[in-house]
Image (spheres, helix red, strand yellow):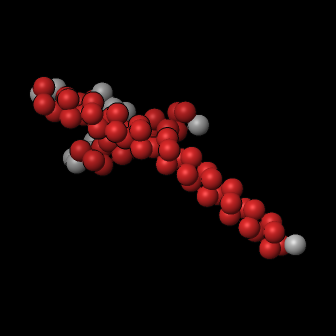
Amino acid sequence: MSNVINESHRSIAQKERFGDMLMFVPCFVVLLAVALLGQLIGFHWRTWLSGAEDSHNMVVGIKTAVYTFMSHIN
């Protein structure tokens, strides 16, 4: 009986992880495009994305901004 419950819990966790990835990837791509556009134009794009203000690396800043955005959605 505990095997059935354990397998069901794993299945739910995998579905949640997949759902999070489906939400993370498009948001990351959109915010990456915003950051690249801002970088090319010469604007301070880190102030546009909440969570990315103190990051020194573009990818880390965008990743932080996506997680901040996702926390507002959930």
Task: Please tell me which residue lies in front, 18 or 48.
Answer: 18
**Residue 51 in which image quadrant:** top left
Across and down, in percent, residue 57 comes to 22, 48
- Tell which residue pokes out farthest to the right in this image: 1
Across and down, in percent, residue 56 comes to 21, 47
Q: In which quarter of the image is the C terminus?
A: top right
Residue 46 visible within the image: no
Say which residue appears at 50% left-offset and 44% top-offset: 22
Is residue 12 shown left or right of residue 68? right
Is residue 31 shown left or right of residue 5? left
Task: Please tell me which residue lies in front, 65 or 27.
Answer: 27
Say which residue appears at 64% left-offset and 57% top-offset: 13
Say which residue appears at 75% left-offset and 68% top-offset: 6
Residue 14 visible within the image: yes
Across and down, in percent, residue 33 comes to 27, 33
Task: Please tell me which residue lies in front, 43 or 34.
Answer: 34
Residue 41 vs 24, above or below: the answer is above
Q: How many labels does the image show?
A: 0
Q: Quadrant of the N terminus?
A: bottom right
Residue 58 vs 48, above or below: the answer is below
Say which residue appears at 30% left-offset and 43% top-offset: 61
Residue 38 vs 60, above or below: the answer is above
Across and down, in percent, residue 28 comes to 37, 41
